[in-house]
Image (spheres, rainbow, N blue to C red):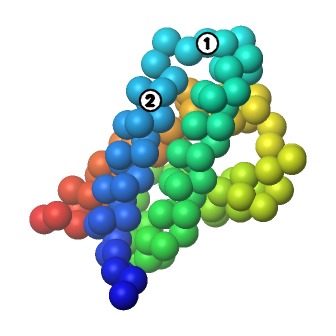
Amino acid sequence: MKEELGDLQRLKHVKKCIDDLMQIMDGVDADTFYRDTEKKYAVERVLEIIGEAINHVSPVTLGKANRVISWRDIIDFRNLVSHEYFRVDYTMVYKIATEGVLDLRITIENLIQQLEY
């Protein structure tokens, strides 16, 4: 039987993925990233998981975010990586992995706090 995950569990998965992503990218500059196939695929996979998890969080919960986050863009990127992998732009992947996740992490932590209390 498939376990149904709630919003809190999914948001905790997203936070864990962001933490993992930050660890993967720690000290990695753009040139290193573009040349390292394993890092590129690892980051791609983590972003895919984040997008899938966000896609299953209720709109009500996402609407409580304290920052403007384009949830649709996160989900759309997941779909691109999963279904149109040949179109993945690693310049964009690097930018998301080094800049885009910072605001997302703060927002996810805030949402987790709201749901826990």
Circle 1: residue type: Asp
Crowding at dot 1, Cα within 10 Å, few <14 / some 14-19 / many 20+, comes out as few
Which comes before the other along the chain, label 1 or label 2?
2
Q: Nearer the viewer, residue 10 or 62?
A: 10
Q: Is residue 79 above or below residue 20?
A: below
On the image, the x and y values in percent for residue 26 come to 46, 19
Find residue 18 and report its image quarter: top left
Q: Is residue 68 visible?
A: yes
Image position of 59 with respect to 69: above or below: below
Which corner quadrant holds the N terminus? Answer: bottom left
Residue holding disc 1: 29
Q: Is label 2 in a helix, a strand or a loop?
A: helix
Which residue position is annotated with label 2? 22
**What is the crowding at mark 2: few (fewer than 14 residues within 10 Å), some, or many (at least 20)?**
some
Residue at x 41%, y 36% (from the top left corner):
20
Q: CA distance from mark 1 to mark 2?
A: 13 Å
Residue at image point 48% right, 73% down:
56
